[in-house]
């Protein structure tokens, strides 16, 4: 049997398109990366603190955990390069996030002549990189304009589930939606024909569908939804935010109060200055300037959070949540960079509390003010 290949002349106006297209479910994969990044740094520091910073090696060799981070990054890149299955993306994100955490945790050694693991600027640098990744996550999590190319890319990724015999009814519904859009909005005849052919194939009643099973994160989300409906009503969430904002606001304002208002402000400044000098966190006039800026910024944020809590008590909810949102956001993105310098990794717990309050504010706005 002979096969004939007909060469189709292309219009000179059709050129190669190499614009990037966001991968299907990129948000979930990046979220896994973020969680593994944060856990890797946090658990590494906690383990080293509890065990007295042990070293793996001998009198000549020292196997630093940056090497384990590099190994995990190496494996994650190999997995993503070699395999085409959909499950490699979550696996690559898990290995890559853990690897980046182990790698960047030792940044202090690589930016100092003395290989100082405890260099004060190390913690802010790690936190800044984490914040940058969070901003990327928030950016790609936004709705993006649909195009024929983007919808077909998503369809092809879902079609991989057909090859693994893992396509379920929900995924088939998503697949048909992508193909319907691509077929109706195709800007070239070949893409229209491709979308129509795939649409006919995917809507065929003989297509094998796997049993519908919720993934791990979907099950967790459903359980959280059940708990929220059972225990978190509007009044309880409101008082949770009031108490949380008040405590966080007073805590943030406390140092500024001791510095400027308290009768013991002179002794407080002397005591704090001595402790910071002994810890090597103030190495000149510039360090004192940073501490003053940190105290002033936290004081301003503390004032915003207290005002937010008071407005919530008065039931001026929109203004209260707007002020609280920007206060917490400013603390997470600005003040914490300075906090990590002076308090190092003890600020992790505080940042987690701030994040929980921020989620509470956003949840209240979504459930009760929209």
Image (cartoon, rainbow, N blue to C red):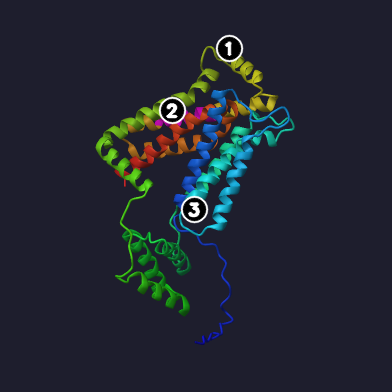
Residue 364 screen position, x and y as percent: 33, 40
Q: Secondary structure at mark 1?
A: helix
At x 56%, y 24%, the residue is: 51
Q: Which badge, 2 or 1, is on the more N-terminal residue?
A: 2
* Crowd rating for badge 3 (residues with CA inside 10 Å; few <14, some 14–19, many 20+): many
Q: CA distance from mark 2 to mark 3?
A: 38 Å
Q: Give the dominant element type of the magenta stretch: helix, strand or loop.
A: helix
* Front in this rendered view, residue 176 or 368: 176
Q: Nearer the viewer, mark 2 or mark 1?
A: 2
Q: Nearer the viewer, mark 2 or mark 3?
A: 3
Q: Which mark is drawn over residue 267?
A: 1
Q: CA distance from mark 2 to mark 1?
A: 24 Å
Q: Which residues are magenta?
A: 296-307
Residue designated by label 3: 89
Q: Which badge, 1 or 3, is on the more N-terminal residue?
A: 3
Q: Which mark is drawn over residue 248?
A: 2
User: Does the magenta portion include 302?
Assistant: yes
């Amino acid at each position: 049997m002979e096969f004939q290949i007909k060469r189709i002349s292309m219009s000179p106006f059709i050129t190669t398109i190499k614009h990037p297209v966001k991968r299907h479910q990129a948000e979930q994969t990046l979220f896994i990366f973020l969680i593994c990044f944060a856990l890797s740094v946090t658990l590494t520091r906690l383990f080293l603190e509890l065990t007295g910073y042990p070293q793996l090696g001998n009198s000549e060799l020292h196997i630093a955990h940056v090497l384990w981070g590099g190994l995990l990054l190496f494996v994650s890149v190999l997995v993503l390069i070699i395999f085409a299955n959909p499950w490699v993306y979550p696996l690559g994100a898990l290995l890559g996030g853990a690897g980046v955490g182990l790698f960047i945790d030792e940044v202090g050694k690589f930016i100092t002549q003395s290989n100082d693991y405890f260099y004060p600027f190390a913690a802010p640098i790690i936190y800044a990189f984490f914040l940058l990744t969070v901003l990327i996550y928030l950016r790609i999590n936004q709705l993006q304009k649909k195009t024929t190319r983007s919808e077909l890319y998503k369809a092809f990724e879902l079609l991989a589930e057909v090859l693994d015999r893992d396509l379920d009814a929900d995924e088939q519904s998503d697949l048909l939606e992508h193909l319907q859009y691509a077929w109706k909005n195709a800007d070239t005849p070949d893409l229209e024909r491709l979308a129509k052919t795939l649409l006919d194939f995917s809507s065929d009643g003989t297509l094998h569908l796997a049993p519908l099973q919720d993934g791990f994160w979907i099950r967790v989300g459903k359980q959280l939804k059940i708990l929220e409906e059972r225990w978190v009503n509007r009044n309880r969430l409101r008082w949770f935010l009031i108490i949380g904002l008040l405590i966080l606001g007073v805590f943030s304002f406390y140092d500024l109060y001791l510095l400027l208002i308290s009768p013991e402000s002179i002794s407080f400044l002397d005591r704090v200055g001595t402790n910071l000098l002994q810890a090597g966190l103030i190495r000149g006039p510039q360090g004192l300037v940073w501490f003053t800026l940190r105290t002033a910024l936290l004081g301003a944020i503390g004032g915003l959070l207290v005002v937010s809590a008071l407005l919530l008590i008065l039931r001026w909810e929109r203004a209260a949540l707007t002020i609280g949102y920007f206060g917490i956001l400013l603390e997470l993105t600005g003040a914490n960079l300075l906090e990590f310098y002076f308090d190092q990794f003890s600020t992790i717990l505080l940042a987690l509390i701030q994040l929980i309050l921020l989620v509470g504010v956003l949840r209240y706005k979504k459930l009760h003010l929209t």
